[in-house]
Image (cartoon, rainbow, N blue to C red):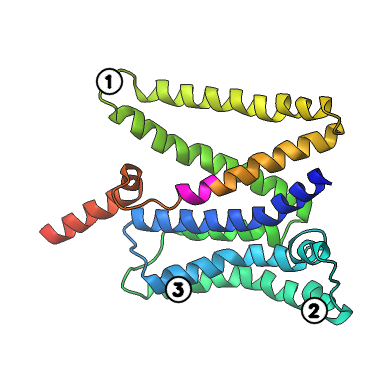
Amino acid sequence: MLGDSLLKLYLTWSPYHYAAQAYGLAVMYSYRSGCALSADNKKMLWWVSMLPFLTVFLTSRQIGIHWLLDVVHVTLPGSIEAFLQQNLAEAIKWLSFAAPVLLYYIVAKSKSGPMPLISIMAVATNAIWFAVLNSTEAFFWATVFHGIQYLAIVIVFHVRDKLAEPDNRRGVAYHVIWFYTVCLAIGYALFNCLPLGYNFAGFPPVESVWIVLAAVNLHHFIVDGYIWRLKKGDTNRRVVETDVAAQTEAAASA
């Protein structure tokens, strides 16, 4: 029961997390390329990024709104169920691909100028996972590439922080190798060793793995929400703002 509930919560939350990350990456790449998105443009980008999540949340039978209604013992009428599974699902699917193109055109015509293609690709790729692939393939590939994205992004922050330390005597290669070695060791301990503890406690082997997987990822989702909210004065904010500031100064002196 515990493992099943954690798993469904994880699978319900995951598409939202991936959509929010696609939005965050799109904004970050835009700012670093000199495209200062307006508040309205960022709102549009947010809702466009959320379309794949809405597809899963509204149409998946075992998770999302169906799981939440099942918890409170509510069953949707057949007509509403058919509308969600057929009409709405198909409409959101096509909108997931048309909306990024329309957004790119709207932003390109605004004062900020066009967004970098990598920003649109981050949003469109997330749409492919959840609007084209079946649910099993979607969660597998989204999880894999989500992890790869983070391993690339986090190393930038880590190396900058380490190189900025007054007593640092190591180069970039050392910090990169050390970081990935520790990540590999922790990953092995979490997903290969920790489930054995639940197994010894009486949980079935498969459920033990799912409990650890869901718990670790739910913790990750919560922590990640704080990480993306970089406040003014945060040293890591320079990763986003450095290029924009440089371009602004160059334009002012021209």
Q: Quadrant of residue 54?
A: bottom right
Q: Earlier in the sequence, mark 3 or mark 2?
A: 2
Pointer 2 and pointer 1: residues touching (CB < 8 Å)?
A: no
Any part of residue 3 in sight: yes
Give the CA distance from mark 3 to mark 2. Answer: 31 Å
Give the CA distance from mark 1 to mark 3. Answer: 48 Å
Q: Secondary structure at mark 2?
A: helix
Q: Nearer the viewer, mark 1 or mark 3?
A: 1
Q: Position of residue 152 (x, y in %)?
A: 49, 38
Amino acid carrying mark 3 in the image: Tyr
**Residue at image point 74% right, 72% down:** 89
**Residue at image point 29% right, 27% down:** 165
Q: Which residue is mark 2?
A: 83
Q: Which residue is mark 1?
A: 167
Amino acid carrying mark 2 in the image: Phe
Q: Is residue 225 magenta?
A: yes
Amino acid carrying mark 1 in the image: Asp
Q: Position of residue 91 (x, y in %)?
A: 70, 76
- Region rendered in magenta: 223-227
Q: Quadrant of residue 116?
A: bottom left
Crowdedness of circle 2 by 10 Å Cα count: few (<14), some, many (20+)? few
Of 15 and 197, the residue lying toward us: 197
Q: Which residue is mark 3?
A: 105
Please tell me whether the stretch drawn in magenta is mainly helix, strand or loop: helix
Pointer 1 and pointer 3: residues touching (CB < 8 Å)?
A: no
